[in-house]
Amino acid sequence: MSVEIRVPVLGESVTSATITRWLKQPGQAVAADEPVVELETDKISVEVPAPQAGILGNELVAVGAEVAVGSVLGTLDPNGTARTEAEPAKADTPKVPSASSAPSQSAATAREPMPAASRLMTEERIDPGAIAQGSGLDGRITKGDVIAQLDQPRAVASSASAAAVQPASQLGHEGPASSPAVATALATLLGKNEQDAREQRIPMTRLRQTIARRLKDAQNTAAILTTFNEVDMSAAKALRAEYREVFEKKHGVKLGFMSIFARACIRALQEFPAINATIDGDDILYRRFVNLGIAVGSERGLVVPVLHDADQMSFAELERHISDYGARARAGTLKLDELSRGTFSITNGGVFGSLLSTPILNPPQSAILGMHAIQDRPVAVDGQVVIRPMMYVALSYDHRMVDGREAVSFLVRVKQYVEDPRRLLLDV
């Protein structure tokens, strides 16, 4: 009896996913808990494991299809026999014995595009014949094949020229040059092809769609205001330089500025609980814990892994989790629970060279801290102009929830903690 492979529960508020690729092909042997298909959700990529050992069946949902939680992706035959590389896939319908019709039907089936691929080819006006071989089941063209085709320059100028010559000859003219209408059409077509060659159109990923939707929702819903300050990083840099080697030797992780800012924010959030609160209908929900989100930029887009109960973590634990989450965010291997239930976020545009920015809230959170590049600048200290490593910091907050006094006081307290880290130890 066949065993069904279903879309697993994908986390809170996630009801569907898109199939990005099959890791196993029909007829291949699959071990229990071995990943067989990769799904992309609104937040991360998820590998679906086999529920038990068996042979992957022929009926698989196409790459590019959107599937709901709990729906069937494919089947496993626990008692099946693995297909050898030389053995062809069994057709779902009997083959036609006619020597003339069977090859053409087989070729047609092999070239038939998947639904998602068909839609994309229609949008991009791509001829299925332009794709030499499909990579899907039984040679069918997948959405990935179409995207790969879009990445290649479209060499259509020669075919366009030949197409323009044919109508002219049918009309009895000597050639395209003798027909102004045909010449104009040819020039227009060649100009369009040249323009197409300089452009590339690819579908937005679910992650990018979600980022766009959530950020726009934040602007439409929250009354976002940003307050700024600057931090003298001299003491933090001195602390890091003095204890970097011994810290790494003892804890196995490097000491960075992010853990100092994280600890400073955690302490300040405890002093100004409105920054860590959220609006829930007509109520205000205050939290007595801190789930700290750390924004990470990856090739797939911006993700914000969450350090749950960060207020209970030491400096070393903060650094260890930040380093681990950052690496797994870039690899796309974070778990859904590690991306949810954040209460406050930190984003560091300084790693990319940003000097100043106004970060956007991560709903339903009420505030986000933006760190920026450290830059040596002249500042006045005790009546003297000195050069100090300075960083601009920005706090964007929901003015519906947070008053300006609280926001400014919170940012000043973060500044005080970072400029004198000893205050974090003495709780002053």
Image (cartoon, rainbow, N blue to C red):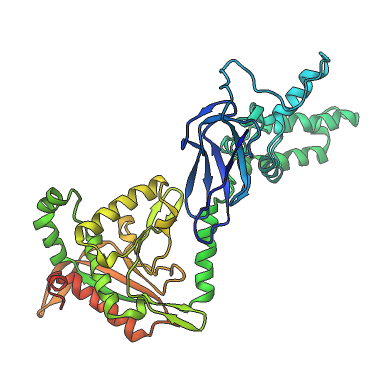
Q: Position of residue 38 (x, y in %)?
A: 52, 41
Reply above or below: 46 against 27: below
Nearer the observer, 201 or 78: 78
Place of residue 155 in the rendered image (x, y in percent of width and height, measured from the top left):
63, 32
Identify which residue is drawn at 50% across, 66% down: 215
Marker count (numbered): 0
Q: Considering the image in quadrants, where does the C terminus appear? A: bottom left
Above or below — where is 19 with respect to 240? above
Q: Is residue 202 left or right of residue 229?
A: right
Quadrant position of the N terminus in the picture: top right
Q: Camera-side residue: 127 or 343?
A: 343
Taking the spot 58% from the left edge, 52% from the top edge, the residue there is 69
Horizontal side of residue 390 vs 81, given as left or right: left
Query: In the image, is 33 to the left or to the right of 352?
Result: right
Classify residue 304 as left or right of residue 143: left
**For the point 33% across and 79% down, which residue is it?**
273
Residue 212 location in percent, x, y?
Answer: 53, 61
- Which quadrant of the view contains residue 220? bottom right
Q: Quadrant of residue 116?
A: top right
The front one of 225 and 279 is 279
| Residue 345 in the image: above or below residue 175 | below
The outermost residue toward the right is 172
